[in-house]
Image (cartoon, helix red, strand yellow):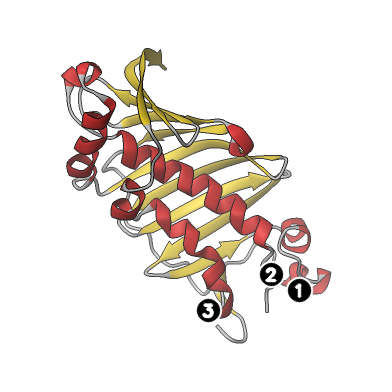
Amino acid sequence: MISMRQSIVRVMAAATVAAANAALTAACGGGGLASETPAQIYEAAASATAQVSGYEATGEVAVTGSKVTFDFKVHGSDFAGSFVLDGSTIQVLAVTGTFYIDAPEAALATDFGISSVEAALLAGRWVEVPPAESADFTDLTSVTDIAAELARHGSLTAGGTATIGGQKVVLVNDGSDSVLAVATSGPAYPVRITATGSSAGHADFSNWNGIAAVTAPPSPIILPGS
C-alpha cells in the first residue's frame, strides 16, 4: 500500500487552495468594479461564483523550499490536475470523492516514500488512493468548495488598478498575504492571485465555464485496502 508523505499532500493542497481563494475572493461585479470598496467586491463574489461551473488555474507556488508549477481544471466538485515537483510531473484526479494519482518512478520513490520495487510497478499508471490514505487529500477539495473558501480571508484593502496580459484589473489586498487581480470589463472573473510569504507564487485563471466533466481513469490499479 502506498504510504503518502505529508509533504507531497501539502504541495498539492497549497496549489489548489491558492487557486480556490483567488476564484472565490475576487470573482464579482461588472465594469464599475474599480470604484467599489473591497468589502463590496468580496460580497459580490458569492453570487458571481455560484453561477460558475468550472475554471482552470495555472501557476507556481513555493512549498518547503521547492518551486511547484501546477495546472488544475475544476468542474463542479471534481478536478483534474497536474503539478511539476523537482522535474517530475505528477497527475491527480478527484472524481465523486475518490482520488487517483499517476506519477513517475522517481517521484513515487522520493516524494511518496514507497519502495523502489513498488515504484517501478506503479510508475506511469493511474492508482486509486486507498481510503485509509485519502484523508490526507481532503485539503485538495477546497478548490471546489466555494461556500467554505468564501468565508476564509483576512482584512481586505484596496490595491488600486493594473494591467495583466493586456487585461485591465482591480487589485484587492487580502490580510492573508495575497493580492487578487479581477477583470474590470466583461465578466469580473479573477485574472491572477499573487501570494507572498512561505508559499510565494501566483495563480492565473481562464476557461471559466469551459471545463468538461472529469471522469475516472480507465482500469486504475486498486491497491489492497482500497
Residue extending farthest bottom = 225
Q: Which numbered tag is attached to residue 122?
A: 2
From the top left corner, tell me how far across and down residue 148 is, in percent: 33, 54
Counting residues from the start of the chain, the first of labels 1 and 3 encountered is 1
Label 1, label 3: how many angstroms apart (C-alpha)?
19 Å
Quadrant location of the C terminus in the rendered image: bottom right
Residue beneath the point at 21% across and 16% down: 35
26 in relation to 75, above or below: above
21 in relation to 204, above or below: below
Label 3 neighbour load within 10 Å: few <14, some 14-19, many 20+: few
- In front of the other: 16 or 171: 171
Label 2 neighbour load within 10 Å: few <14, some 14-19, many 20+: some
Residue beneath the point at 60% across and 61% down: 102
217 in relation to 210, above or below: below
- In front of the other: 44 or 59: 44
From the top left corner, tell me how far across and down residue 28 is, in percent: 23, 33
Label 1, label 2: how many angstroms apart (C-alpha)?
6 Å
Q: Secondary structure at mark 3?
A: helix
- In front of the other: 108 or 150: 150
Residues under numbered marks 1 and 3 in contact, where contact means CB atoms less than 8 Å apart:
no
Counting residues from the start of the chain, the first of labels 2 and 3 encountered is 2
Q: Which numbered tag is attached to residue 131?
A: 3
Q: Which numbered tag is attached to residue 118?
A: 1
Q: Amino acid at mark 1?
A: Glu
Q: Amino acid at mark 3?
A: Pro
38 in relation to 58, above or below: above
